[in-house]
Image (cartoon, grey):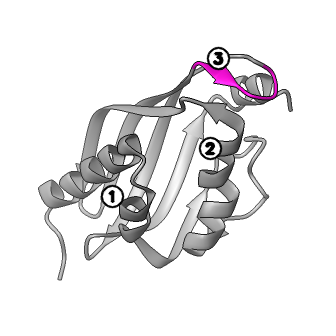
Amino acid sequence: MTQTVSSNVEVMKDLYEAFARGDIETVLARMADDIEWYEAEGNPWHPGRAFRGRQEVVDGVIQRIAEEYEGFQVLPHRFIAGGDTVVVEARYAAPRCRATGKALDAQVAHVWDLRDGKVVRFQQYVDTRHLADVLGA
């Protein structure tokens, strides 16, 4: 069953709202078992390949956010949909990186591909130089 464009946008809005509440269980439930998650090339956390599956996303991204930042937020402000793809313009914000004490404030774009209401692919675009500076990488 193919989702409508508007229902795909609602899925993504729900995902961002769950993340903002700290409801990681709901975030993960929106991901397909075999999700491919791509951090931006040049991101200090980019392993040179996709994170595959929910557990790799938890270990390689979600857990690291919790460990390395205080008060991390993703602040979406625009959702653009076409078919099974939703692009989200947002900002990353955190008052403090634990390693450096620096604040994070970065413009970001996320590209989400969905199938039957589940995220099957994620691609991040962000100022990787700023991320590296904040993280001290």
Q: Amino acid at mark 1?
A: Thr
User: Which residue is label 2 attached to?
Assistant: 66
Residue under label 1: 85
Q: Is residue 9 visible?
A: yes
| Amino acid at pointer 3 | Ala
User: Is 137 positioned to the left or the right of 120 in the image?
Assistant: right
Q: Earlier in the sequence, mark 2 or mark 3?
A: 2
Picture coordinates of residue 79 (x, y %)?
Answer: 27, 40
Q: Disc 2 residue type?
A: Ala
- Reading the chain from its start, which is encountered first: label 3 or label 1? 1
Q: Which mark is residue 125?
A: none
- Indicate the secondary structure of the residue bearing disc 1: strand
Find out whether the residues at labels 2 and 1 contact each other: C-beta distance under 8 Å: no
Q: Which is in the foreground here, disc 2 or disc 3?
A: 2
Query: Dots 2 and 3: beta carbons under 8 Å?
Result: no
Which SS class for mark 2?
A: helix
Q: Label 3: which residue?
A: 103
**What stretch of residues is rendered in magenta?**
95-100
State which quarter of the image contains the C terminus.
Answer: top right
**Spatial CA span between label 2 and label 1:** 27 Å
User: Quick one: 124 or 73, which is closer to the camera?
Assistant: 73
Question: Which x, y percent locates residue 24?
Answer: 44, 57
